[in-house]
Image (cartoon, rainbow, N blue to C red):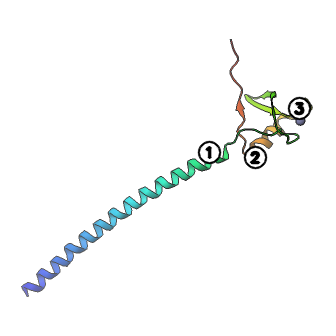
Amino acid sequence: MELTERGTEMKTQWLWVGSLSLALLVVVGCKKKEKAEQAEQAEKTAVSAKVQTTCPHMGEKIDKSIYVDHEGKRVYFCCKMCVAKFKADPGKYVKKLEDEGVELEKTPPAQP
Ligand SMILES: [Zn+2]
Protein backbone atom coordinates (compact mmCIF):
# COMPACT_ATOMS: atom_id res chain seq x y z
CA MET A 1 0.00 0.00 0.00
CA GLU A 2 2.72 2.42 1.07
CA LEU A 3 4.84 1.67 -1.96
CA THR A 4 2.05 2.40 -4.41
CA GLU A 5 1.40 5.79 -2.82
CA ARG A 6 5.04 6.79 -3.09
CA GLY A 7 5.06 5.77 -6.69
CA THR A 8 2.14 7.99 -7.50
CA GLU A 9 3.78 10.93 -5.75
CA MET A 10 6.95 10.53 -7.75
CA LYS A 11 4.97 10.41 -10.97
CA THR A 12 3.18 13.64 -10.08
CA GLN A 13 6.51 15.36 -9.43
CA TRP A 14 7.93 14.29 -12.75
CA LEU A 15 4.82 15.49 -14.47
CA TRP A 16 5.32 18.92 -12.89
CA VAL A 17 8.95 19.15 -13.97
CA GLY A 18 7.93 18.02 -17.42
CA SER A 19 5.25 20.65 -17.91
CA LEU A 20 7.45 23.37 -16.46
CA SER A 21 10.29 22.74 -18.87
CA LEU A 22 7.79 22.49 -21.71
CA ALA A 23 6.34 25.90 -20.77
CA LEU A 24 9.87 27.32 -20.62
CA LEU A 25 10.65 25.93 -24.05
CA VAL A 26 7.50 27.47 -25.50
CA VAL A 27 8.32 30.90 -24.04
CA VAL A 28 11.90 30.83 -25.31
CA GLY A 29 10.74 29.55 -28.66
CA CYS A 30 8.22 32.37 -29.03
CA LYS A 31 10.80 35.02 -28.21
CA LYS A 32 13.16 33.65 -30.82
CA LYS A 33 10.41 33.67 -33.43
CA GLU A 34 9.50 37.25 -32.54
CA LYS A 35 13.08 38.38 -33.08
CA ALA A 36 13.29 36.62 -36.42
CA GLU A 37 10.06 38.27 -37.53
CA GLN A 38 11.33 41.68 -36.50
CA ALA A 39 14.52 41.20 -38.49
CA GLU A 40 12.51 40.08 -41.49
CA GLN A 41 10.27 43.14 -41.20
CA ALA A 42 13.29 45.47 -41.08
CA GLU A 43 14.69 43.79 -44.17
CA LYS A 44 11.42 44.23 -46.04
CA THR A 45 11.30 47.92 -45.17
CA ALA A 46 14.84 48.39 -46.41
CA VAL A 47 14.01 46.73 -49.69
CA SER A 48 10.76 48.58 -50.34
CA ALA A 49 12.16 52.07 -49.65
CA LYS A 50 14.20 52.88 -52.71
CA VAL A 51 15.53 56.17 -53.97
CA GLN A 52 14.34 57.63 -57.24
CA THR A 53 16.52 56.59 -60.14
CA THR A 54 14.26 57.04 -63.14
CA CYS A 55 12.25 59.90 -64.60
CA PRO A 56 8.53 59.54 -63.76
CA HIS A 57 7.52 60.61 -67.26
CA MET A 58 9.96 58.96 -69.67
CA GLY A 59 11.37 56.27 -67.42
CA GLU A 60 14.89 57.37 -68.37
CA LYS A 61 17.77 57.72 -65.90
CA ILE A 62 17.40 60.92 -63.90
CA ASP A 63 19.64 63.97 -64.14
CA LYS A 64 20.24 65.20 -60.58
CA SER A 65 20.46 68.79 -61.79
CA ILE A 66 16.91 68.71 -63.14
CA TYR A 67 14.30 68.54 -60.42
CA VAL A 68 11.10 70.09 -59.11
CA ASP A 69 10.15 70.51 -55.47
CA HIS A 70 6.55 69.51 -54.97
CA GLU A 71 4.84 69.64 -51.56
CA GLY A 72 8.11 69.15 -49.70
CA LYS A 73 9.27 66.33 -51.98
CA ARG A 74 12.01 66.57 -54.58
CA VAL A 75 11.29 64.86 -57.88
CA TYR A 76 14.10 64.36 -60.41
CA PHE A 77 13.76 64.17 -64.19
CA CYS A 78 15.81 63.15 -67.20
CA CYS A 79 15.18 66.34 -69.17
CA LYS A 80 13.41 69.71 -69.05
CA MET A 81 10.60 68.44 -71.25
CA CYS A 82 9.52 66.04 -68.51
CA VAL A 83 9.56 68.89 -65.98
CA ALA A 84 6.93 70.67 -68.07
CA LYS A 85 4.86 67.46 -68.19
CA PHE A 86 5.20 67.06 -64.44
CA LYS A 87 4.08 70.62 -63.74
CA ALA A 88 0.89 70.02 -65.71
CA ASP A 89 -0.10 67.21 -63.30
CA PRO A 90 2.37 66.85 -60.40
CA GLY A 91 0.12 64.73 -58.18
CA LYS A 92 -0.14 62.03 -60.85
CA TYR A 93 3.62 61.63 -61.17
CA VAL A 94 4.29 61.71 -57.43
CA LYS A 95 1.67 59.01 -56.94
CA LYS A 96 3.16 56.96 -59.77
CA LEU A 97 6.60 57.06 -58.16
CA GLU A 98 5.29 56.27 -54.71
CA ASP A 99 3.24 53.40 -56.09
CA GLU A 100 6.50 51.97 -57.40
CA GLY A 101 7.88 52.08 -53.85
CA VAL A 102 10.11 55.09 -54.45
CA GLU A 103 10.78 57.22 -51.40
CA LEU A 104 11.15 60.75 -52.71
CA GLU A 105 13.87 62.96 -51.27
CA LYS A 106 12.69 65.65 -48.91
CA THR A 107 13.12 69.21 -50.06
CA PRO A 108 15.98 70.65 -48.02
CA PRO A 109 14.93 73.52 -45.76
CA ALA A 110 15.43 76.96 -47.29
CA GLN A 111 18.74 78.57 -46.40
CA PRO A 112 18.32 81.77 -44.38
ZN1 LIG B 1 12.71 63.35 -69.76
User: In the image, which disc is placed on residue 75?
Assistant: none
Mark 3 beta carbon near ligand 1 (under 8 Å): yes
> Marks 1/2: CA distance?
14 Å
Residue indicated by mark 2: 100
Real-space CA distance between mark 2 and mark 3, rounded to the nearest whole angstrom = 21 Å
User: Where is residue 74, by image quadrant?
Assistant: top right
Element assignment for label 2: loop
Q: Secondary structure at mark 3?
A: loop
- Total residue callouts: 3
SS of the residue at dot 1? helix
Q: Tag 1: Cα neighbours inside 10 Å, few (<14), some, or many (≥20)?
A: few
On-image quarter of the C terminus: top right
Q: Name the residue at 7% across, 84% down.
A: 2
Counting residues from the start of the chain, the first of labels 1 and 2 encountered is: 1
Percent x, y for residue 17? 24, 69
**Amino acid on which the number 1 mark rests in the picture:** Ala
Which label lies toward us, 2 or 3?
3
Contact between labelled residues 1 and 3, with CB atoms less than 8 Å apart? no
The foreground one among 5 and 45 is: 45
Q: Is residue 48 left or right of residue 83?
A: left
Label ID, residue 46: 1
User: Where residue 27 sits: x, y (%)?
Assistant: 37, 60
